[in-house]
């Protein structure tokens, strides 16, 4: 029984160590490199949400290209 409690404590300790490392890394990645966004509505048709479907598209927003000024003609730019 004592061995099971020790194993449970080690598991919880390892979980929190991983959690406190993963959260800042994930937040930094989403803020600096890229994030996922949903495009809804007809404003971007026909490029996104083609046709008369009422489904939303999912896009990857690349923050890195904007920071390096690598935007070219034909790219879709999102402002938040």
Image (spheres, rainbow, N blue to C red):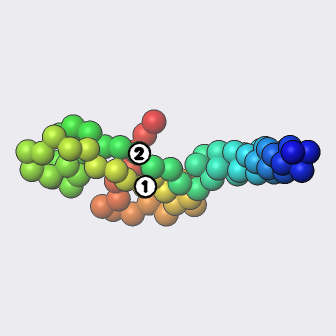
Residue at (26%, 39%) from the top-left corner?
A: 40
Q: Position of residue 73 (x, y in %)?
A: 33, 62
User: With 56 as the anchor, is 23 left or right in this view?
Assistant: right
As drawn, the label of residue 37 is 2
Q: Position of residue 57 (x, y in %)?
A: 28, 49
Q: Are marks 1 and 2 in contact (CB under 8 Å)?
A: yes
Of 71 and 27, nearer the camera is: 27
Q: Reading the chain from its start, which is encountered first: label 1 or label 2?
A: 2
- The alpha-carbon separation of the residues under discs 1 and 2 comes to 6 Å
Q: Which residue is mark 1?
A: 60
Quadrant where the N terminus sits is top right
- State the SS at label 1: strand
Quadrant the C terminus occupies: top left
x then y, percent, for residue 22: 71, 50
Q: Mark on residue 27?
A: none
Horizontal arrangement in the rendering, residue 5 relative to residue 42 (left or right)? right
Residue at the extreme front:
1
Q: How many marks?
A: 2
Along the viewing direction, whichever of 50 and 12 lies nearer the viewer: 12
Can you give x and y, in whole percent of width and height, for residue 13 in the image? Answer: 84, 46
Asked whether residue 21 is in view, the answer is: no
Of residues 32 and 40, the one nearer the viewer is 40
């Amino acid at each position: 029984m004592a061995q099971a409690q020790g194993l449970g404590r080690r598991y919880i300790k390892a979980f929190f160590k991983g959690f406190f490392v993963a959260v800042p890394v994930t937040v930094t990645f989403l803020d600096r490199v890229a994030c996922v966004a949903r495009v809804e509505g007809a404003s971007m048709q026909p490029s996104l949400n083609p046709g008369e479907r009422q489904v939303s598209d999912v896009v990857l927003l690349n923050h890195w290209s904007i920071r390096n000024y690598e935007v070219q003609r034909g790219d879709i730019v999102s402002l938040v």
